[in-house]
């Protein structure tokens, strides 16, 4: 049994996409036994590019069902089947992340018609769905709409099955997809990891953490480890059976958590902000060892963005006003800012210019008194220079609401 699928997304950033159009044909090798076709309300914007490509407008999906309303139907129609698609990795990822948002782990065997077509129909100029089916004489109506593309994929799949007279390639593809090869192990372990900052934990079969670190991109870092040829990572590659992570959100939060854990992971801040001849400039810190930078940056680009931001605020032309804005040595304040996820806030307790504690609270939580905050706070005993710099950058950008310390 197979379920032939095609999905169109709203064109948002990687792993932020939402489904706007879906079509599934359940196929028993002879005939279609069930089908499900629907527009989906993404509850977010559709990019102009996708609107032009698919002809799907926000108005069309406004009254369409939301994903949670069709989730059960998708599970039912795909149950006990192999999911088939043209570039199936995209469709499978879209389903997995959509179900993940509902707290459901959607798993199914998959089969991709692209590598099958390359083996069974060699020497084609292109293996994109549109060009391939046109070359083979397979009708394709409503290209870049789920129903039309899924139906064309089904007809292509029928042709591939008929060409595979001994069923060897279908069988081999099925075995490769589901065998626990090293490549599939990497795919299985990393496919749902976010491209965000956080702590990553590699665990062995018994659940023991065999390696952990704070990284800028959890997904990218894990793939880099598994693809490394260095002997340094051999044990991690061999023994890892599970990867967990803890998101840290903004750079301020990341550094707060590192500091609270006593991890002294110093970041290289090669560029600095300087004020000369009534102008703010960014240059490498090593060029002038006698002059201390007002702020430090990881890259020239980060510094340039800061200079542009400063230029948009007229009062910052006065260096004294600027220094007063970023100075926090004598502050006794409560700072409130963005948390690690939607609906969460971060608070910092500043005493005499030092972060003594921090914590997180949900938007509906009442935190008017220090006694309330004390139940949520995490004490900070070590404050790095990197954290100081990050806090100054946050003050400059206006990332925090600064309030007098409550009693």
Image (cartoon, rainbow, N blue to C red):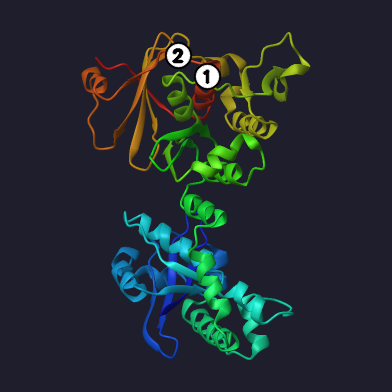
Residue 278 horizontal/vertical position (percent): 70, 19
Which residue, given by chain and number where applicable, does mark 2 sit on? 382
Viewer-side residue, 297 vs 28: 28
Location of residue 35 with respect to 317 vertically, above or below: below
Element under label 1?
A: loop
Please report contact status of discs 1 and 2: CB closer than 8 Å, yes or no: yes
Q: Residue at x 66, y 80 (%)?
A: 131
Location of residue 398 with respect to 83 vertically, above or below: above
Determine which quarter of the picture holds residue 208.
top left
Q: CA distance from mark 1 to mark 2?
A: 9 Å
Which residue, given by chain and number where applicable, does mark 1 sit on? 264
Q: Considering the image in quadrants, where does the N terminus appear?
A: bottom left
Seen in the image, is 210 located left or right of residue 266?
A: left
Mark toward the viewer: 1 or 2: 1
Viewer-side residue, 44 vs 229: 229
Seen in the image, is 51 located left or right of residue 270?
A: left
Q: Considering the image in quadrants, where does the C terminus appear?
A: top left
Residue 310 horizontal/vertical position (percent): 60, 28
Element under label 2?
A: loop
């Amino acid at each position: 049994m197979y379920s032939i699928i095609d999905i169109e997304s709203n064109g948002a950033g990687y792993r932020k996409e939402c489904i706007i159009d879906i079509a599934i044909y359940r196929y028993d090798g002879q005939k279609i036994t069930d089908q499900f076709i629907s527009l989906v309300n993404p509850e977010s914007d559709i990019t102009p590019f996708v609107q032009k490509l698919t002809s799907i407008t926000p108005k069309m999906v406004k009254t369409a069902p939301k994903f949670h309303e069709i989730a059960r139907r998708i599970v039912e129609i795909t149950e006990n089947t192999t999911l088939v698609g043209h570039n199936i990795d995209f469709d499978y990822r879209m389903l997995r992340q959509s179900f993940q948002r509902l707290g459901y782990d959607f798993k199914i065997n998959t089969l991709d018609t692209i590598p099958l077509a390359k083996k069974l129909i060699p020497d084609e100029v292109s293996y994109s769905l549109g060009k391939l089916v046109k070359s083979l004489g397979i009708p394709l109506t409503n290209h870049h709409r789920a129903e039309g593309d899924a139906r064309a994929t089904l007809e292509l799949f029928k042709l591939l099955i008929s060409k595979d007279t001994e069923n060897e390639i279908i069988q081999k593809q099925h075995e490769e997809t589901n065998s626990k090869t090293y490549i599939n192990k990497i795919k299985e372990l990393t496919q749902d990891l976010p491209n965000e900052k956080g702590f990553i934990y590699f665990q062995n079969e018994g659940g023991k953490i065999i390696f952990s670190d704070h990284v800028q991109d959890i997904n990218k870092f894990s793939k880099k480890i598994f693809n490394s040829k260095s002997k340094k990572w051999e044990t991690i590659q061999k023994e890892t059976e599970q990867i967990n992570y803890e998101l840290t959100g903004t750079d301020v939060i990341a550094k707060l958590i590192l500091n609270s854990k006593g991890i002294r992971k110093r970041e290289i801040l090669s560029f600095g902000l300087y004020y000369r001849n009534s102008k703010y400039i960014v240059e490498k810190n090593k060029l002038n060892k006698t002059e201390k930078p007002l702020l430090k940056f990881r890259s020239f680009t980060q510094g340039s963005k800061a200079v542009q931001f400063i230029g948009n605020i007229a009062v910052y032309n006065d260096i004294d006003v600027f220094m007063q804005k970023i100075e926090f040595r004598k502050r006794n304040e409560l700072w409130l800012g963005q948390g690690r996820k939607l609906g969460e806030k971060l608070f910092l307790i500043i005493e005499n210019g030092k972060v003594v504690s921090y914590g997180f609270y949900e938007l509906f939580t009442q935190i008017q008194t220090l006694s309330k905050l004390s139940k949520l706070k995490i004490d900070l005993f070590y404050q790095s220079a990197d954290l100081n710099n990050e806090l100054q950058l946050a003050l400059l950008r206006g990332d925090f609401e600064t309030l007098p310390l409550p009693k």
